[in-house]
Image: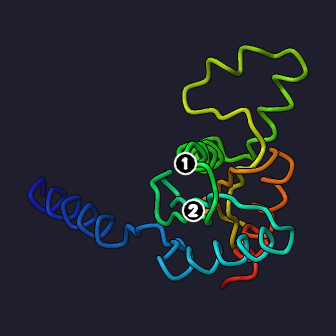
Amino acid sequence: MSKIIGSLLAMSLLCAVTFAQLATRKALTLNAAKQIAAAAEAEALKNQWNVVIAVADDGGNLLYLQRMDGTQVGSVQVAIDKARSAVLFRRPTKVFEDAVLGGRNGVMKLEGAMPVEGGLPLVIDGAIVGSIGVSGVTSQQDGIIAKAGAEAAARMK
């Protein structure tokens, strides 16, 4: 009898493993990242703003970067940091900027938090699939450009 019960338990465990499912999720491709950056670049060009545009995957890893002609080299790392911060904390970097401006200086100690507007999560079908970071003009202008890229991502399926 105990052998039968043991066999049934082993079979039920095997069935549980067999029916376990992995999560399915959307992921950014290089082509999608380029389209997102192109939408951001179009907004920058419309306003005659030279910027760096960084697109990161859902782990905060750089997927695509472009520096428009005439943009200062220092903006490369800033754009990457904005993109990384937006995806790691799952919120716009403006949230951190506003907190610091409101006197919450402790935000400055959060590892990876970039307290400057211009970083946005990229949301497709309600899920964060990556982020965009823009640097090169004022933080508010960077935010406008990043928004154009985020809106392009939201229209993707």
Mark 1: few/some/many CA within 10 Å (<14, 14-19, 20+): few
Between 26 and 148, the residue placed more toward the observer is 148
Indicate whether 62 appears above or below 47: above
For marks 2 and 1, the one nearer the N-term is 2
Q: Position of residue 86 (x, y in %)?
A: 65, 47
Circles 2 and 1 in contact, beta carbons < 8 Å: yes
Left or right of 130 in this view: 59 = left
Indicate whether 61 appears above or below 102: below
Residue identified by numbered label 1: 73
Residue identified by numbered label 2: 67
Q: Position of residue 130 (x, y in %)?
A: 58, 61
What's under tag 2, amino acid-wise? Answer: Arg
Extreme residue in the front direction: 70
Extreme residue in the left direction: 3
Q: Say which residue appears at 53% left-offset and 71% top-offset.
A: 25
Between 25 and 147, the residue placed more toward the observer is 147
Between 76 and 147, the residue placed more toward the observer is 76
Left or right of 136 in this view: 13 = left
Q: Distance of mark 2 from mark 1, alpha carbons?
A: 8 Å
Quadrant where the N terminus sits is bottom left
Q: Secondary structure at mark 1?
A: loop
